[in-house]
Amino acid sequence: MSTPSLATSGSLLQLENMELRTLFDGVGAYFFIKNLQGQYLFANQAVCTLFRRPLADLLGRDDTCFFDLQRSPNQTLNDARVLKQAEEIHEREEVYLVGEDTPRVFWVVKVPICDAAGSVTGMCGIATDITHRQRQTQDDIDHSEMLNAVLSNVDAYIYLKDHAGRYLYANAKVLTLYGRGPDDVIGHTDLELLPTDEATRLAGMDQAVLHSGERASAEEIIVDTEGAARHFWSVKMPLKLPGQPPALIGFSSDITELLQLKRGMEQHRTTDTLTGLPNRAQFERLLASRIEAMPHQPLAVLLFDLDQFKYLNNSVGHAAGDEVLKEVAARIDDCSWLPGPTARLAGNEFALAVTGFSDSEGLRRIAMQVQHLLEQPVRLGPQLFQLTAGMGISVYPADALSADQLVARAEAAMFDAKEKGRGRFRFYSAELGAAVAARLSLERDLRAAQDKQEFELYYQPKIDARSGKVAGAEALLRWHRGGQEMVPPVLFIPLAEQLELIVQIGDWVIATACRQLQTWHGAGLTGMKLAVNLSVVQLNDAGLAARVAEQMRRYGIGPDQLELEITESMMMSDPEQAIANLQALRALGVSLSIDDFGTGYSSMAYLKRLPVSALKLDRSFIQNIDQDAADADLCAGVIALAHMLGLQVVAEGVETAPQRDALLARDCDFFQGYLFARPMPVAEATAYLQQAA
Ligand code: C2E
Ligand code: CA
Ligand code: CA
């Protein structure tokens, strides 16, 4: 078989490029190119499937191989009109494929391909199968509707241009893009149709394809009739015409939306959606590139977290809370004396990068200015809110060299500032770093402590003041960290509360205390009460009373054997909730006492509402009771008042006989302290109790 060509003989239209072929296969219609002799130079996959031949078998053959031309007269006729008269055909064609008895009906668009001199050298065709609509009369088939049906299937811009850039063919999409009719486009160049700079850019790629004789693909930008820049991915191929300068065929897809989507995703990856500020990852990238660009210039990270934002969110609602965050973002972002990048790292945590400060004093002034900026009241509807923030500052290169370390260290300093109170700032320091590291390792070990059975209860006896007999004991928690070092409760209980580990640990304490009571009871040590300390976090846990009841049942503990110690400050956070819980516990019959009385926000008003039976006078009150008359009077007053309210009084931390005597003289009911016994491990405590009994 001779090599098919667009002209009578000779050169080949090479559409071997896979990418271009794939694009044609995707058009959802039959697409083909034939030469002047009617031989196929190209056919897309749809045509190959229709003819049941691979492309290689099809190229160079004409329609005698595929159609029963005798019974398909308008097929032959139409091709002749295109190839001989250079007409453009938009018509319905009824054809019989070889070996088929029923006709197929196609809507075809056939366009002549001309050379530079205007002579037809071949044709390009697109056809869609409308067999199922064949019963409709010709009249029914609205010409332009069908044309649209065909061309809207081709979701791409298809065009042929000659060597001088004149359009030989342009499909409807191209015409719409240019906002022109076919007569204004065919025979014209981009230079006549588009602004000069755009046309020059397009011509650049066209020229490259024509000169190299090779396909090219690239992104192109064309401003559409509405003035919007549209992005295209264009694939262009040379069309070699014998004895003629080469022409080209182009196929462009609009990728504008795709790019927008991609940009949106990029945006999402780098930006906090609420405030539009960079997010943490992006902030660290910006810092890193700043450091890389100017490694010798100091840079500070100011990181702040709004104080009590959770409270604000709960009281005014999340939508209003979001408004506050946006307002804060705008304040720091609009601030002309803060030219560095700003970011929202998380929740109510923001950061800014500061340069151009003279020394730490200069930086301190900037930090104060930022705080001042934040403290300007925010208006939410009729209400004005005053914000404060805890702020941490880290400095490159003194505190850290990498962006993420700088942020982490500023954050550590911020946490420290917040622990000290509202509206503070703190510079990162090596000591703080060490403290943070120590705290992190304490946290890690504390999380594992329960599984490793590192907790133990110590017991400190409570003495009846008048009889001198043991009335009970208080269970005190001990942590043997790493099996040896004993960490005092004041160091780990606040942490356990913060991490909310105290609920589980507290459950263990209650269960262990109940089991110990049962053991002592079995050993004949009856009639004593064991006190267990409760944390505020436990008190806010709705399931607490049920779990206490379960342990009491499990170990057969009567309500008169168990006492729970709570502190007054527990009432402050959520008094109603705490009181509800205490009432549930009281309903179980266990007694409640107020621990550390006199240290917190002592409020006799609360005392009256609480179902408590005892007060534990804090050690600081009785320390000087034997020497200081004012302290002694205060104790006497509290004891008298407590008795009037029907409460018993326990004196804590009794260390000396004179303290004991002074308390006894003022009618104190119970003593607890080193004078009688220290907190002891269970074996020692058991021996003590047995000997005292
Ligand atoms: P607290 O409830 O006021 O416990 C009394 C503290 O005073 C104990 O300290 C005890 O060892 C100490 N103490 C007793 N007598 C004397 C004395 O004569 N002189 C002096 N200087 N101190 C005395 P500890 O065991 O270190 O416990 C400290 C705090 O830890 C407790 O204070 C309590 O608030 C908390 N705590 C201990 N165990 C638990 C527990 O199981 N759960 C909870 N939530 N808190 C606990
Ligand atoms: Ca206590
Ligand atoms: Ca106490």
Image (cartoon, rainbow, N blue to C red):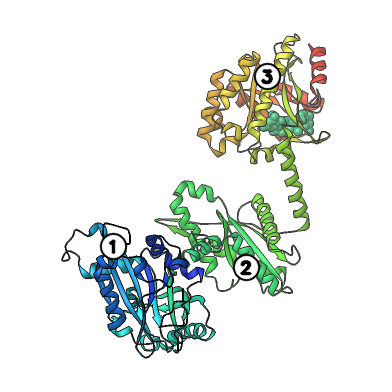
In the rendered image, is residue 137 in sight?
Answer: yes
Front-most of 113 and 543? 113
Residues under labels 3 and 1: Cα distance?
96 Å
Image marks 2 and 1: residues in contact by CB distance under 8 Å: no
| Amino acid found under the numbered disc labelled 3 | Cys
Crowd around label 1: few <14 · some 14–19 · many ≥20 (10 Å): many
| Lower position in the chain sequence, tag 2 or tag 1 | 1
Q: Secondary structure at mark 1?
A: loop
Crowd around label 3: few <14 · some 14–19 · many ≥20 (10 Å): many
- Is 381 above or below relative to 512? below
Q: Which mark is residue 514?
A: 3
| Amino acid found under the numbered disc labelled 2 | Leu
| Amino acid found under the numbered disc labelled 1 | Tyr
Quarter in which the C terminus is drawn: top right
- Which residue is drawn at the image coordinates 51% and 71% (left, top)? 17
Coordinates of residue 233 in the picture (x, y in percent): 47, 72
Q: Which mark is residue 286?
A: 2
Residue lying furthest bottom: 117
Image marks 3 and 1: residues in contact by CB distance under 8 Å: no
Q: Which mark is residue 96?
A: 1
Coordinates of residue 271 in the picture (x, y in percent): 53, 62
- Look at discs 2 and 3 and give the one toward the viewer: 2
